[in-house]
Amino acid sequence: MTTADAWSETPATALLVLADGSIIEGVGLGATGQAVGEICFNTAMTGYQEILTDPSYSGQIITFTFPHIGNVGTNDEDIETVNMAADSGIRGVVLAAEVTDPNNYRAARHLDAWLKSRNMIGICGVDTRALTALIREKGVPNGVIAHSPDGKFDRDALKTAASNWPGLVGMDLAKDASTTQSHPWSQTTWHWDEGFGETTEGKFKVVAIDFGIKRNILRLLTDAGCEVTVLPATASAEDVLAHRPDGVFLSNGPGDPAATGTYAVKTIKKVVDTGVPTFGICLGHQMLALALGGQTLKMHQGHHGANHPVFDHTTGKVEITSMNHGFAVDAESLPDNVQQTHVSLFDGSNCGLAMKDKPVFSVQYHPEASPGPRDSHYLFKRFTDLMKARETEPA
């Protein structure tokens, strides 16, 4: 593979080296140095800052299929990472076109400077269509992204680093993405000319277990009338239940659900057994499936984008969703007391489940979007409806 034609006469100051030894040349931006990770592609046309701060991408190098990334700059509001100390864990970003100067009234910083501040390496001038086609054909490769302004690289060492990296299977990355201590959340969603709001009260007490949670999830829970307390990924069932929650939320996050599940599944099982309404998304969905007796598997290329159609068996409707996952629930492994509620119309993979005998459900995709369509916001009301129904049950 080669660099894009527009960059053919520009010396390579960045490389993307695949585990099979392939080398893609380009022009570097952002931080200098090198980082190893799994190379995926994202098809979203907007919201690159939200994507680049989504902890679910930890351990990955993101290739944007949309060519013009960075032209609206960056700001301090469109950041999705809650645990700023851990940052997002993203290893790098691959772009087609050169990043132009920002031209947006909300812009506070150029993408190049923003990447430097977050120690994230970038490469542009890459034929991202060809790279995406390769991933679709052969699956997500491991690789190294490297940036050196003088254009000097030890290419053999980079090839070795790429081929030796073990990949995401078996990796527990949620601990690093999670908060380290419990804390309340009170911020509500952003509104035009108003910014973010605050609330000091909520009808339902919700504990959100943070496996790498996004800010907009917490905002939508607050909007839905929840008084939210965020707990670390390693929280025990006793920690969760000590808050006497009306509901428990299992968040998104990075890595292999089976690896994180070595400690989280025990907690989820105990919580579910109490009958407290429980709602999971993404990694939380996968670990809920494990807790209920199902299995997860690594996907060929994963789902990453804001245009994924999903069919909801419970309503008969199709919604366009935001997705970001490289593992999936094996629907065939789900026990008899669990039903598949949602399915991907791209590849038929599982996108949702619900227990038949308890107020417990989850989805694979990101109903909070940010970025993406808002078709799935109804799921937050479905969660509060379960909590409301439990309130009216006879003692």
Image (cartoon, helix red, strand yellow):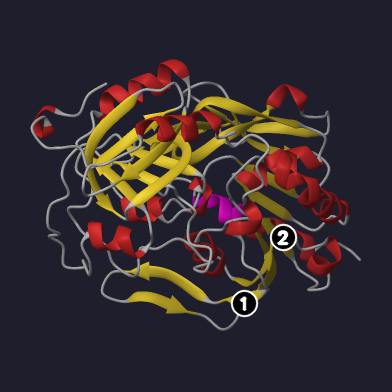
Left or right: 114, with 302 as reference point? left
Number of on-image labels: 2
Observer-nearest of 250 and 27 = 27
Which circle, 2 or 1, is nearer the viewer?
1
Observer-nearest of 24 and 244 = 24
Q: Which quarter of the picture shows residue 106?
A: bottom left
Above or below — where is 320 with respect to 28? above
Segment colored magenta: 377-382
- The answer to whether any part of residue 373 appears in the image is no
Mark 2–mark 1 Cα distance, whole angstroms, equals 14 Å
Observer-nearest of 87 and 51 = 87
Residue 248's label in the rendered image is: 2
Residue at 44 percent across and 47 percent down: it is 91
Placement of the C terminus among the 4 image quadrants? bottom right
- The answer to whether any part of residue 331 appears in the image is yes
The answer to if 27 sits in the magenta stretch is no
Residue at 77 percent across and 32 percent down: it is 294
Q: In the rendering, at what x and y percent does residue 394 appear? A: 88, 63
Residue at 52 percent across and 48 percent down: it is 56
- Residue kind at label 2, given as amino acid type: Val
- Residue kind at label 1, given as amino acid type: Pro
Q: Which quarter of the picture shows residue 159?
A: top left
Give neighbour class at mark 1: few <14, some 14-19, many 20+ (Cα, 10 Å).
Answer: few
Q: Earlier in the sequence, mark 2 or mark 1?
A: 1
The residue pinned by badge 1 equals 184
Give neighbour class at mark 2: few <14, some 14-19, many 20+ (Cα, 10 Å).
Answer: many
Left or right: 214, with 104 as reference point? right
